[in-house]
Image (cartoon, rainbow, N blue to C red):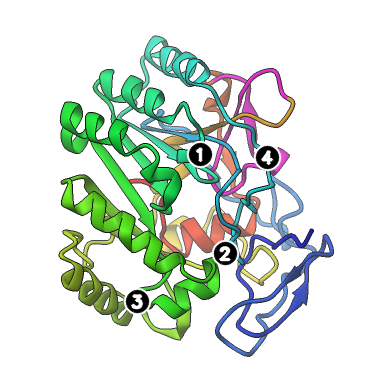
């Protein structure tokens, strides 16, 4: 079976990644500079011997739940390699999520929001029960979805949740580009139309909506991308403000093999950023590995497979600092300025 590497390759430029999997996609002809293999090797110091940046845990405000890596489609560039066959992360059960929420409450965490990601979360049959549990505790819930058939299979349950909890439930729909051809290049022929059908349905029924796209997909700058999305939303009557960076999140490309600077302690002052603003300062993700008896906690939604970012079997254990010892820490969070939640 052809497996697709999680990073974003430049267009029409096939390459073989370190695990031998071929990646073909992208929209620029030149290959990016490859990562110096001496980088990101030591959790404490960079390849130049400088102290690596570390993010202290300030309290759990966002809990992410990976519902499982199975997905109804196979994208060309999926950071988690989701597909109809990848069950490396198994379906997590509602009772296991409830136990995490109970622990968060017992610890007195400042938890505000629970996000559900996958895979395609709506393939997990427990998702409606998990959402009702989260919302019933007075928390906000966020679901990341491609808004296709798996979501529509839960239409009745979603309408019930919308009626009971209103805007505390937000659905974030993945739409890689505002043009069908480019979106379908990434996610498969016809996926743009099917996703738009789901987005239209959510809009008609008054759900809280966000959209996630890709910042530089197709070679356009961010302003041009936002104008394109704005025109699409206006044409369909979708109430998403394309100028709002939360309502329309445009994520940077993630290529773990492209060269990127390591983040040192000095970078906070140079970049005028606070470590408290990083996602791992206030968020953790619960995952259930295939064959595991119980879920575990990882520091970052982007790195569910990296053992260095597994921070504990419980939320209490997972409150330790995180060393920014991965290219995604630089590309996505520190330099890219992205975050998975509000």
Residue marked by disc 3: 222
Residue 110 appears in the picture as rendered: no
Residue 130, image x and y in percent?
Answer: 40, 24
Residue 188, position as x, y percentages in the image: 54, 68
Judge whether residue 250 is colored magenta.
no
First in sequence: mark 2 vs mark 3? 3
Q: Secondary structure at mark 4?
A: loop
Residue drawn 69% across and 47% down? 85
Q: Secondary structure at mark 1?
A: helix
- The residue range painted magenta reads 292-314
Q: Which residue is mark 4?
A: 87
Nearer to me, 323 or 143: 143
- Give the residue at mark 1: 123
Q: Per the image, is 303 magenta?
A: yes
On the rendered image, what quadrant is the N terminus found in? bottom right
**Disc 2/disc 3 C-alpha distance (Å):** 16 Å
Residue 203 image position (x, y, % from top left) = 20, 53
Q: Quadrant of residue 312?
A: top right
User: Which quarter of the figure has residue 225?
Assistant: bottom left
Tell which tag, 2 or 4, sits nearer the viewer: 4
User: In the rendered structure, which disc, 2 or 4, sits on the residue that comes first in sequence?
Assistant: 4
């Amino acid at each position: 079976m052809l497996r697709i590497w999680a990073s974003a390759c430049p267009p029409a430029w096939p390459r073989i990644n370190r695990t031998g999997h071929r990646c073909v996609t992208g929209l620029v002809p030149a290959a990016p500079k490859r990562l110096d293999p001496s980088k990101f090797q030591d959790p404490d110091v960079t390849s130049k011997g400088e102290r690596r940046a570390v993010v202290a845990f300030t309290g759990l405000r966002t809990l992410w739940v990976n519902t499982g890596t199975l997905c109804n489609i196979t994208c060309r560039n999926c950071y988690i390699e989701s597909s109809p066959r990848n069950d490396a992360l198994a379906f997590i059960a509602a009772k296991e999520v409830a136990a995490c929420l109970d622990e968060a409450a017992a610890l007195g965490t400042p938890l505000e929001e629970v996000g559900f990601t996958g895979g395609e979360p709506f393939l997990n049959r427990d998702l409606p029960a998990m959402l009702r549990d989260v919302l019933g505790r007075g928390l906000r819930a966020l679901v990341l979805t491609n808004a296709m058939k798996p979501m529509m299979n839960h239409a009745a349950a979603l309408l019930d949740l919308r009626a009971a909890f209103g805007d505390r439930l937000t659905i974030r729909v993945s739409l890689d580009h505002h043009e069908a051809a480019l979106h379908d290049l990434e996610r498969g022929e016809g996926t743009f139309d099917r996703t738009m059908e789901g987005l239209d349905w959510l809009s008609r029924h008054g759900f809280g909506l966000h959209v996630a796209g890709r910042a530089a997909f197709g070679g356009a700058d961010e302003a041009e991308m936002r104008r394109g999305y704005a025109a699409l939303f206006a044409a369909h009557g979708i109430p998403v403000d394309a100028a709002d960076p939360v309502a329309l999140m445009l994520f940077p490309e993630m290529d773990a093999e492209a060269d990127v600077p390591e983040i040192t302690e000095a970078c906070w002052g140079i970049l005028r950023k606070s470590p408290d603003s990083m996602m791992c300062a206030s968020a953790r993700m619960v995952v259930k590995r295939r064959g595991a008896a119980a879920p575990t906690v990882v520091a970052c939604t982007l790195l569910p497979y990296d053992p260095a970012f597994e921070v504990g079997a419980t939320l209490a254990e997972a409150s330790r600092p995180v060393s920014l010892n991965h290219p995604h820490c630089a590309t996505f969070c520190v330099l890219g300025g992205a975050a998975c939640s509000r």
